[in-house]
Amino acid sequence: MKKRIDWDQYFMIQAALLASRSTCNRLSVGAVLVRDKRIIAGGYNGSVSGDAHCIDDGCYLRDGHCVRTIHAEMNAILQCAKFGISTDGASLYVTDFPCLQCTKSLLQAGIKEINYIRNYHNDEYAMKLIKLKNIRLNQIKLDDNILEQVALDQYIHPKQK
């Protein structure tokens, strides 16, 4: 009998699938907001709707950061805001540890759990805020057999440029 994947694996694979839609040249990130084992929103890092994409016109850099890109976590939160969906008490599944600005937004939006695959410039102050707010923080390792089945390995283990 075929074994079902657990919920964490399922939602993290959804985040990885969203990362495949990223329009950023530097890092593909996907995020899924979940409440009561139901996806309420998803996002990936990319440009404001209607603007040029980094994959087409290159990154728009200021101080080493692309200002064209909206982070995946913010796109998921903004999707909820646009469609009137509460984020209070939701969990986040994201391919990479959230930056400080996303962490602050997630906490302010009522996110109670952050699940991620990769560490990515984990900010010390973000970690302090996560502890202060008693947010559950889980680094999840995806089962390689599952990744091969769904052909998403390149978004979980990207080749270094």
Image (cartoon, rainbow, N blue to C red):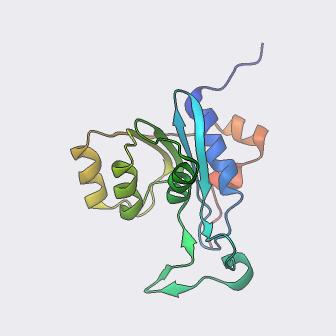
Give the answer, above or below, for where 67 lies relative to 12: below
Give the answer, above or below, for where 58 lies relative to 46: below
The quadrant where residue 102 appears: bottom left
Quadrant of the drawing holding the C terminus:
bottom right
- Residue extending furthest top? 1
Looking at the image, which is closer to me, 91 or 9? 91
- At a point 53% along the width and 56% down the height, the residue shown is 78
- At a point 50% along the width and 59% down the height, the residue shown is 74
The quadrant where residue 103 appears: bottom left
Q: Position of residue 128 (x, y in %)?
A: 23, 52
Left or right: 161 in relation to 36: right
Q: Position of residue 132 (x, y in %)?
A: 21, 45
Quadrant of the drawing holding the N terminus:
top right
Left or right: 21 in relation to 134: right
Q: Position of residue 36 (x, y in %)?
A: 52, 27
Left or right: 160 in relation to 100: right
Q: How many marks?
A: 0
